[in-house]
Image: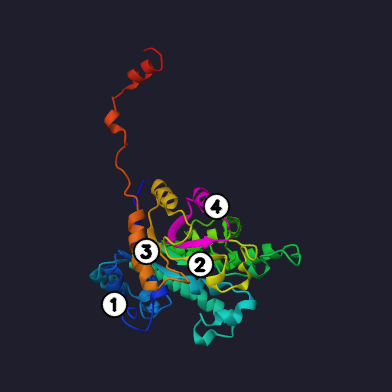
Amino acid sequence: MKTIKGPALFLAQFAGDEAPFNDLASITRWAAGIGYKGVQIPSWDGRFIDLAKAADSKTYCDELAGICAESGVQITELSTHLQGQLVASHPAYDSAFDGFAAPEVRNNPKGRAEWAADQVKLALKASANLGLTEQATFSGALAWPYVYPWPQRPAGLIETAFEELGRRWTPLLNYADEMGVDLCYEIHPGEDLFDGATFEMFLDNVNGHSRANILYDPSHFVLQCLDYVDFMDIYKDRIKMFHVKDAEFNPTGRQGVYSGYQPWVNRAGRFRSLGDGQVDFSAIFSKFAAMDFNGWAVVEWECCLKHPEDGAREGAQFVADHIIRVTERAFDDFADGGADEAANRKMLGLGA
């Protein structure tokens, strides 16, 4: 058993243009000051990291790590959620996702996808330079507009989508292997990898690649009524990252899983600040303690009600309170009477 590391904080939701949220030194001092020991860095945010420079220069990466260490935290992982999203994007979302890309590849789906793949590779090289072994990402989505089977899906439609998804990601997974980094796909509605079944379909199309792993976030499972503790048992060998995020699902006679196009405040399913939702984190942290998880408990704060700074402060304490320092000995060692093979055979009535 291993004690999970943490608490850490994903910085994406807190980045801003005003201090202390506008540069790496300031935001990490703030995070450390409210109880965090690590930070997950959004690789697309130039206020915190120059991704091209980090991929090119180990010295620059040492400087980034030094800034964090001086603040009292360490870098846990880099995130390529937005770039991964653009590796595979259905044309229905071209306008919505164009803003994630560099200006020179907007309104150019092919160029945008190539740029996104290059960004993922830069982040993998930067992760290696930083001494990191996991990287967060989205899978992107080609099949998501067809998630509900009406009208009837043409035969082979979903299979073709996943074949293409596998074709686009296999070179990136191979590069991840060269860098010694696991790509951890956040299992997330809106992506083609949104539950265990779709993750397995993806694995089939990347030949079970050892670097294709999971960023586990139970909030996304609450909102689709999936057994998030059983998920951990099924995929324990693939879960390499953990987002600590809460959610609640309160169906009514008017709305259920799809939540009727309502704004977040009025949805049956909505994300909540840690401790305000329905996720059984005692069960989750117990499971992580038992399964030798070697990663970090990273707070991803998202809530439509609470102020983010309050959520961040409360989240650090929440995670600290839930981390289980694993035992080094059995609880009933006091009753150990000692034994040897001869004694064991005698106790079993097997004689000498």
- Bin the neighbour count of mark 3 within 10 Å (Cα to Cα): few under 14, some 14-19, many 20 and up: many
Amino acid on which disc 3 is placed: Gly
Between discs 2 and 1, the one toward the N terminus: 1
Image quadrant assignment for residue 343: top left
Judge depth for marks 4 and 1 and give the one in front. 4
Q: CA distance from mark 2 to mark 3?
A: 33 Å
**For the point 43% across and 69% down, which residue is it?**
79
Residue 245 part of the magenta segment = yes
Q: Is residue 187 left or right of residue 15?
A: right
Amino acid on which disc 4 is placed: Asp
User: What's the magenta region?
Assistant: 225-250
| Residue 170 position within the rendered picture, expressed as x and y whole percent measured from the top left | 55, 64
Q: Could you say which disc has been placed on residue 227 in the image?
A: 4
Judge depth for marks 2 and 1 and give the one in front. 1
Q: Which residue was labeled with disc 3?
A: 315
Q: Nearer the viewer, residue 253 or 66?
A: 253
Q: Could you say which disc has been placed on residue 172 in the image?
A: 2
| Residue 175 position within the rendered picture, expressed as x and y whole percent measured from the top left | 47, 66
Q: Which residue was labeled with disc 1?
A: 26
250 versus 266 height, above or below: above
